[in-house]
Image (cartoon, rainbow, N blue to C red):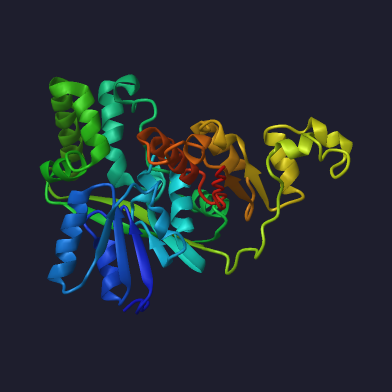
């Protein structure tokens, strides 16, 4: 059963070994699978070939997908991948960028801690046995989001998508023994493997013994059965974007010579984030000139993304180090362009056309 996808293009991001991609192929879709691991994509390709399907693959991180994938898919999926991205909002924005008007993105997300007992046992025993400080993840470590309907809907709306969250679907995850549970949920989970590496051999062995003891106490040394609930998050893209984007050439227009003749004189006080807010009340786009002279920091781009409303576009100007270079093929010029493109892509949904102004 299921929805037919005959002839439609589907993009599967963080595809792993290809479970979602293979299902889309089975339903008649043309599928491109991306993943940060070429080895995982090789496995996915082999699985597709074994089932007499052709799978296109691209090695790419989910928060920086290739530019040529923009707007080309009816559906962009990510299984349980996007929920583990370091920047989930950026990942959702990238999925959104790759679907055509009226298309959709879809990804699965495990529920809250209360809904995922199977995944909470090891962290809980670790804290009780070794303490909070020893088991806390390092600063900046990626952690999966709380997959509640409220959180998922908010993330989809922030990307300019109409949210539809379905679930929960609850599964009983079964392991034949406590040892089998440890193999699957400790040694098979990247986050727990990283914790064990940080703990060192002695404390890792102590944690293992404590987990096995807790499981044997609870299940009497027999089969381990724990539940976990998941949700399906679907975001539908608007059917059409505005046909024309109008806006001034830079934030400075608000406080510069346009203040008075065009804007109210009080506009001169609007600078930075206030200028962006001011412009959004009157236009649907702005050209950002400062990127021609310096690469914006990740925090600056994150602020633009957070403050840009649905449908508003930021048009970034390419670095002068490339456009005005004596030889644009020079490694330093190409390096400046590459860094700019990577930072521009991190803007996500508000990213508009890129301006390359040559002499």
- Residue 139 location (% of width, % of height): 38, 25
- Residue 274 location (% of width, % of height): 72, 35
Q: Residue furthest front?
A: 326
Residue at 37% over, 38% down: 143
* Image quarter hosting the C terminus: top right
Residue at 48% over, 57% down: 96
- Residue 288 location (% of width, % of height): 62, 41
Residue at 88% over, 39% down: 260
- Residue 11 location (% of width, % of height): 36, 62
Seen in the picture, residue 317 relative to 94 is either above or below; the reply is above
* Image quarter hosting the N terminus: bottom left
Q: Is residue 166 visible?
A: no
Badge count: 0
Left or right position of 12 against 236? left
For this rendering, which residue is in front, 328 or 349? 328
For this rendering, which residue is in front, 297 or 200? 297
Residue at 42% over, 36% down: 333
Left or right position of 317 against 11? right
Seen in the picture, residue 153 relative to 1 is either above or below; the reply is above
For this rendering, which residue is in front, 325 or 60? 325
Left or right position of 255 against 306? right
Q: Quadrant of residue 128?
A: top left
Q: Is residue 99 visible?
A: yes
For this rendering, which residue is in front, 227 or 346? 346
């Amino acid at each position: 059963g299921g929805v037919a996808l005959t002839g439609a293009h589907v993009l599967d991001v963080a595809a792993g070994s290809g479970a979602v991609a293979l299902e889309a192929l089975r339903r008649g879709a043309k599928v491109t699978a991306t993943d940060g691991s070429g080895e995982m994509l090789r496995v996915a390709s082999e699985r597709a070939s074994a089932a007499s399907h052709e799978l296109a693959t691209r090695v790419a991180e989910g928060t920086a997908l290739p530019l040529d994938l923009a707007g080309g898919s009816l559906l962009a999926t990510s299984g349980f991948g996007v929920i583990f991205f370091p920047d989930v909002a950026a990942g959702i924005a990238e999925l959104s960028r790759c679907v055509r008007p009226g298309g959709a993105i879809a990804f699965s997300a495990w529920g809250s801690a209360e809904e995922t007992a199977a995944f909470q046992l090891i962290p809980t025993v670790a804290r009780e046995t070794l303490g909070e400080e020893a088991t806390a993840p390092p600063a900046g470590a990626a952690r999966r989001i709380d997959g509640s309907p409220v959180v998922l809907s908010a993330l989809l709306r922030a990307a300019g998508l109409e949210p539809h969250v379905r679930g929960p679907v609850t599964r009983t995850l079964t392991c034949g023994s406590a040892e089998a549970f440890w193999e699957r949920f400790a040694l098979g989970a990247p986050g727990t493997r990283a914790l064990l590496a940080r703990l060192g051999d002695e404390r890792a062995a102590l944690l293992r013994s404590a987990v096995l003891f807790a499981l044997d106490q609870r299940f009497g040394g027999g089969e381990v059965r724990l539940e976990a609930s998941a949700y399906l998050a679907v975001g539908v893209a608007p059917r059409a974007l505005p046909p024309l984007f109008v806006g001034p050439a830079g934030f400075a227009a608000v406080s510069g010579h346009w203040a008075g003749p065009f804007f109210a004189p009080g506009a001169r006080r609007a600078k930075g984030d206030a200028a962006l807010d001011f412009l959004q009340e009157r236009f649907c786009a702005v050209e950002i000139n400062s990127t021609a002279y310096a690469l914006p920091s990740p925090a600056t781009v994150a602020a633009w993304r957070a403050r840009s409303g649905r449908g508003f576009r930021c048009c970034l100007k390419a670095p002068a180090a490339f456009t005005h270079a004596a030889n644009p093929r020079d490694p330093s010029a190409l390096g400046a362009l590459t860094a700019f493109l990577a930072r521009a892509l991190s803007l996500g949904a508000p990213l508009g056309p890129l301006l390359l102004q040559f002499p």
